[in-house]
Amino acid sequence: KKCMKVYLAYINMMNDHIRRAHEIRNPWKFKHVTELKSLAGFDDSQPVVVMASPGMLQSGLSRELFERWCPDKRNGLMMPGYTVAGTLGHHVMSEPTEITTQAGDTVPVNLSIEYISFSAHSDYTQTSGFIA
């Protein structure tokens, strides 16, 4: 939510399409995108896409979701960008058959694992090209 304030503050820096859309409604409010603060009440009985950080999968919701979803072959994990050696995120890139959960249990890794090259860092030219 904090980053959205930046976009709203600099709407004049956006392309014409975004500026016109902003006159009608907030183009940064997405109907099907919400913030997940905990797994309490989270319904994943239907298809769902989660964008989670940190990509190292060491702790937090991303780790909890991975442990919850990794035994089911219908699920998938896309690792975006760099992972640090010694982290679960780095380990899963070697496609292990099982992992140890934070609780110490061993669970099978049946979900598909893919890597995509992604960096949140860009320079002025790249950012301007994306926005325009």
Image (cartoon, grey):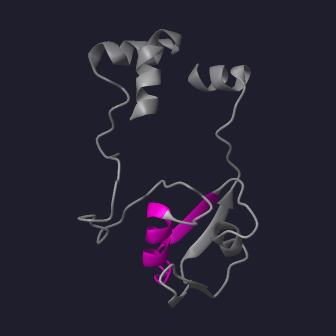
* Quarter assignment of residue 11: top left
Q: Which residue in the rendered view is the most extreme toward the top?
A: 12
The location of residue 48, given as percent across then percent down, is 37, 62
The quarter of the picture where the N terminus appears is top left
Indicate whether residue 24 is drawn in magenta: no
- Give the residue drawn at x 36%, y 26%: 27
Q: Is residue 83 left or right of residue 17?
A: right
Between residues 127 and 37, which one lies in front from this camera angle? Answer: 37
The quarter of the picture where the C terminus appears is top right
Indicate whether residue 77 is drawn in magenta: yes
- Give the residue drawn at x 68%, y 79%: 95
Tell how many labels.
0
Q: Which residue in the rendered view is the most extreme toward the right?
A: 85
The location of residue 61, given as percent across then percent down, is 44, 62
- Give the residue drawn at x 71%, y 51%: 117
Q: Is residue 44 left or right of residue 4?
A: left
The location of residue 85, given as percent across then percent down, is 76, 66
- In the displayed structure, 73 sits above or below 120; it is below
Between residues 3 and 115, which one lies in front from this camera angle? Answer: 3
* Quarter assignment of residue 123: top right
- In the displayed structure, 19 sits above or below 116; it is above
Q: Which residue in the rendered view is the most extreme toward the left?
A: 41
Region in magenta: 60-79
Q: Is residue 35 left or right of residue 74?
A: left
The location of residue 127, given as percent across then percent down, is 64, 25
- In the displayed structure, 86 sits above or below 71; it is above
